[in-house]
Image: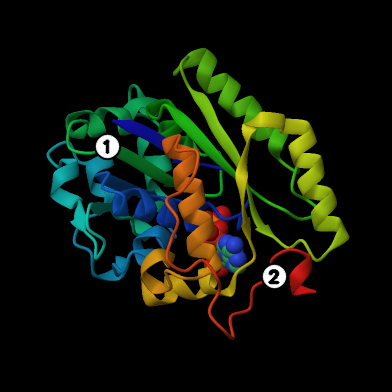
Amino acid sequence: MKTIAIANQKGGCGKTTTAVNLSACLAQRGCRVLLVDLDPQAHATLGVGIDPYKLEESVYDVLLKPDRSVQDIVRRTEVKNLWVAPSNILLSGADIELVNRMGRERVLEEVFSNVTTLYDYVIIDCAPSLSLLTVNAMNFVQEILIPIQAHYYAMEGMKQLFSTIDEVKKRLNPDLKILGILLTMVDTRTNICREVVRGVRDYFQDKVFKTEIHINVKLTEAPSAGKPITVYDPCSVGAKEYEDLASEVLGVEKEVPRETTTAPQGETVFHGEEAV
Ligand SMILES: Nc1ncnc2c1ncn2[C@@H]1O[C@H](COP(=O)(O)OP(=O)(O)OP(=O)(O)O)[C@@H](O)[C@H]1O
Ligand SMILES: [Mg+2]
């Protein structure tokens, strides 16, 4: 089983969009995927069509109640091979409630230890903070995927993120690796965006995924329908780009050609110079 946390304490940089759509792409290729929503905002839960307000139990219950197990809360999604461990607002109290727990950074690892044979991938959508829950995710996973929004403040907070990762490696999870840095919401029409993309690539070199996720309105619409992009609009540029990301994550050099890779008419796609 591979375990990946999608983390960056910066808000709105594309963590949830990446967690939901990468999970769906991997599942559609036949991997059994568990998407874990570790954010009280519950956007990943909503993104796969589950209403967090109607949940009887969530990740919160598994973390806080010793008699509850992960399989009690896992829900099937509309995508074959994709399950979700949903979140709800109660999770916002978990950090404080876990603070006095012995081994508080290892709670997530403990509760997920008995599902390792059930899934090929566990993908965790982290909240925009370096909280105890995020540290739990970093302790549990093998790899971290860091989405960076390609705009002026892209690198802000990176130092703090990397020092937290180093600290986790030193004290908790020595094998923790960076799977890659993903440039998101790229708008190549603007000079500043192109500069940021170049800057991030120069700085992080081969740690940056070749795939870039461009600004694509379909990616903003899909969550309101409670569907991953590959279900909501499989022909969109956003779907194609998350498919490419899945190929990189799987280590497949080239994606099997899709029947249609062009955006349907009327779609707002800011993709490269041709959109100008
Ligand atoms: N490539 C994209 N093109 C257009 N909109 C996008 C794209 N990626 C994400 N968005 C939109 O940007 C907003 C923030 O994205 P998302 O929720 O994935 O970020 P996040 O890092 O999970 O946020 P938070 O830190 O609050 O958890 C959402 O409204 C999402 O639909
Ligand atoms: Mg999010």
> Which of these two is toward me, 118 or 113?
118
Position in image of residue 228 (x %, y %): 39, 64
Q: Residue farthest to the bottom?
A: 266
Nearer-N-terminus badge (2/1): 1
* Mark sitting on residue 188: none
**Left of 57 or right of it: where is 23?**
right
Image quarter for residue 51?
bottom left
Whether residue 133 sits left or right of residue 263 in the image: it is: left
Q: Residue at 36% of width from left, 36% of height from top?
A: 98
Q: Label 2 to label 1, Cα distance in Å?
A: 34 Å
User: Is 92 situated above or below 41?
Assistant: above
**Above or below for 220 versus 202:** below
* Residue drawn where x is 45% and y is 34% of the image: 251
At x 59% / y 86%, what residue is drawn?
Answer: 266
Numbered disc total: 2
Question: Which residue in the structure is indicated by mark 2?
Answer: 270
- Point out the image quarter for the N terminus: top left
- Look at the numbered disc 1 and give the secondary structure of its residue: loop
Q: Secondary structure at mark 2?
A: loop
231, above or below 86, in the image: below
- Find residue 249 and report its horizontal and vertical position in percent: 46, 38
Q: Position of 1 compared to 246: left or right?
A: left
Q: Are there few (<14), some (14-19), or many (20+) residues within 10 Å of tag 2?
A: some
Residue 239 visible? The answer is yes
- Picture coordinates of residue 140, whole percent (x, y): 37, 28
Mark 1 is surrounded, within 10 Å at the Cα level, by few (under 14), some (14 to 19) or many (20 or more) other residues, namely: some
- The residue that disc 1 covers is 120
Amino acid found under the numbered disc labelled 2: Phe
Amino acid tagged 1: Asp
- Callout 2–callout 1 Cβ contact below 8 Å: no
Towards the viewer: 27 or 117: 27
Residue situated in front as seen by the camera: 12 or 232: 232
